[in-house]
Image (cartoon, coloured by chain):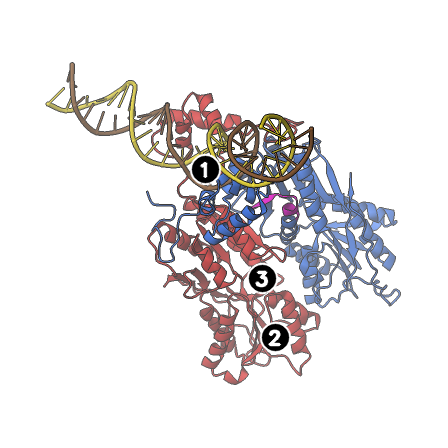
Chain colours: A red, B blue, C brown, D yellow
Amino acid sequence: MEPPVPGSDGAEGRVRRPTMEDVAARVGVSRSLVSLVFRDAPGAGPRTRERVLRAAAEIGYRPDSAARVLARSRSRVLGVLLTVRNPFHADLVEAIYPEAERLGYDVVLSADAPTRSSHKAIETLLGHRCEAVILLGPTARPSFLTSVLRRAVVVSVGRRFPGTGVETVHTAEARGIRSAVDYLTALGHREIVHIDGGSNAGSPERRRDYRAAMRRNGLADEIRVLRGDHTEESGAVAAHQLLSEDRLPTAVLAGNDRCAMGFLDAVSRAGVVVPDDVSVVGFDDIPSAGLSHIALTTVRQDVPGLARAAVELAVHRLENSAEPGRESVLDPELVVRETTAAPRGTTATRPPRHEPDRLAPSVR
Amino acid sequence: MEPPVPGSDGAEGRVRRPTMEDVAARVGVSRSLVSLVFRDAPGAGPRTRERVLRAAAEIGYRPDSAARVLARSRSRVLGVLLTVRNPFHADLVEAIYPEAERLGYDVVLSADAPTRSSHKAIETLLGHRCEAVILLGPTARPSFLTSVLRRAVVVSVGRRFPGTGVETVHTAEARGIRSAVDYLTALGHREIVHIDGGSNAGSPERRRDYRAAMRRNGLADEIRVLRGDHTEESGAVAAHQLLSEDRLPTAVLAGNDRCAMGFLDAVSRAGVVVPDDVSVVGFDDIPSAGLSHIALTTVRQDVPGLARAAVELAVHRLENSAEPGRESVLDPELVVRETTAAPRGTTATRPPRHEPDRLAPSVR
DNA sequence: GCGCTCTACTGGAGCGCTCTAGTATCGCTT
DNA sequence: AAGCGATACTAGAGCGCTCCAGTAGAGCGC
């Protein structure tokens, strides 16, 4: 049998990983003491502590997380399931890392993909002893999630699983949609079309909330929903459909930013000027929405807030007695940029950019 | 001290994770036998094997990867460092998973981000006992990578680290750039501007290769490089710069697709028609480049090939004697879509879409 | 000088697996 | 009947860490 790294110490001299034992021997203390230092536990003198740390650095010791996880009664590991292509997930992951670290948890990532089911990705997470899994816009079947619940706390970001014991964090879609519709209405728009997001997380809510907001503004007759999904392509398809008709609506509320950007791109190629000919509002506020040449007016989801709430919910659930099925709802804010204006033929000037009213996150 | 999951078996009844011992007891065999079955090792009777598998499924047993990794002489874990926002990395990750699985390796992901240095992300990977780390477009300092080499095989995708012992997988930038310039030249373009990618992986090569290709086509006097990076924003900035001048060049070769898309967007807003007024070529072929409304002509990197080569290089290096510093170079292909045409005033018809010549990957 | 508390440290039993070295049982030859 | 090689299984020693129980010695009051 070969040593851990085959070819023994090859050209670059890879060698056996140093262990705590090695550090201990070098300093002349017990392994327990070294462990104690690395866990930041009380009981070591400041001088010794420093010597241990120095010795460890000298021999390039790093704690072995497999051994650590195995030995601990609590693993303190949070699993995150993401769809690696999804830029919104990317933002969430970036925000989850520091938050987990702050609370003393490790994060392991697992991605689903066309060739890798979320089922399998979650199994991998559980294999890593995650105490809780945070699922970003999960597409898994509720029945599977229920079985996962026997092993770990489950937090879903974006999608609701009422009555299953899955914790949920999501945006108050209704408030976001309503503020967008109200804003467009205030500008003088009446023909406001919604390109929806199909069955993606949040979409049924957004569709329903659009209808409600239209009715609230006395625009029940103008309600029009175009089928879409959360891709640029679907925005472009909707654009072509609208372009093929007699005339455009004066405003479009897209299911998300990617859809809005696909729409924008397709109409500007057709010579339509945004916002003069048509106003466009997105949802999410992904990074590219804010780029100067896009400057998309959109409903911003509070990504750091969602990340923080997800981690906190998971940790709270782990460290306190069982109180399943909590729900954390965060308010979005309308970010007005340059793709919205009063419709042609009304007051020529655009309203000033208004500072969005940031609302405190609420926990129900 | 609380049991593994605090609140003991709470509302949903989370309980102690079953172990091999539990499975063994249920079937009435030894733990070793169960281990053997789960490792697919020879030495168990077919009937027993089946009974073990069934019992495991009944009690919801899953192998504990921490314990497994700890006990094994080889961890068979590959670490992947990615920048979670980067869509090109997303594609690579998706392709790495199945490839690693095929060779019997586990994959653990770690992301760098503005708030999380690649240094730290790599440390995490090493803590998980990765035998090899695959770094996607790494930004780490070579000196740090050298220190990592003592612990693991290092494979860099995209960026070269000559003479360090880091294995490298990358695209033959020169061939890609040359085919793009040759193609544009054949269409009749002479004023071909390159918006470069700054210090991003592959950019210095692309810049150099652009110059070489221009010279080869007798266009040394037309060489013009605009400073950029790999974001949409930089494409838009370059567009505004060019628009502010007397007249546009007839063709633009962008540093990557995102840059190309930023450029496209900015010029079409200014009323410039692509490809009639200006031809645009990208680099990478990210998914959105192929969308019908974008239809970007671009130099496609062979993502599945890069992923496969990276995993194979890592595994080869682990399983054979030390042969450091191999390099695997994959050929790109020019994908002609709808953002390129002959310049205004020349032969009116566009050439037919030509089927790109796919070349076999070469290993040097 | 005595017990007493405190701090600084050590010993050792696991955590859930893997993997080598064994043992038991079988069928089959000689 | 003894021997033999397979095959099917078991025993048990780790892997590198955590964490609890325990010890040595210093400092202190009385």
Give percent across and percent down for residue A298.
53, 66
User: In the image, is residue A93 part of the stretch drawn in magenta?
Assistant: no
Gap between marks 3 and 1 measured at Cα: 42 Å
Q: If you read the primary sequence from the N terminus, does the residue marked by circle 2 or circle 1 appear first?
A: 1
Few, some or many residues within 10 Å of mark 1 (<14, 14–19, 20+) = some
Judging from the image, what secondary structure is the residue with disc 1 in? Answer: helix
Few, some or many residues within 10 Å of mark 2 (<14, 14–19, 20+) = many
- Drawn side of residue A104 relative to residue B250, left or right: left
Gap between marks 3 and 2 measured at Cα: 17 Å
Q: Which residue is mark 3?
A: A289
Q: Are marks 2 and 1 on the same chain?
A: yes
Q: Which residue is mark 1?
A: A68
Q: Which residue is mark 2?
A: A278
Judging from the image, what secondary structure is the residue with disc 3 in? Answer: helix
Q: What chain letter is assigned to the residue under label 1? A: A
Q: Is residue A257 visible?
A: yes
- Drawn side of residue A241 relative to residue A350, left or right: right
- Drawn side of residue A296 relative to residue A54, left or right: right
Give percent across and percent down for residue A165.
41, 61
User: In the image, is residue B100 part of the stretch drawn in magenta?
Assistant: yes
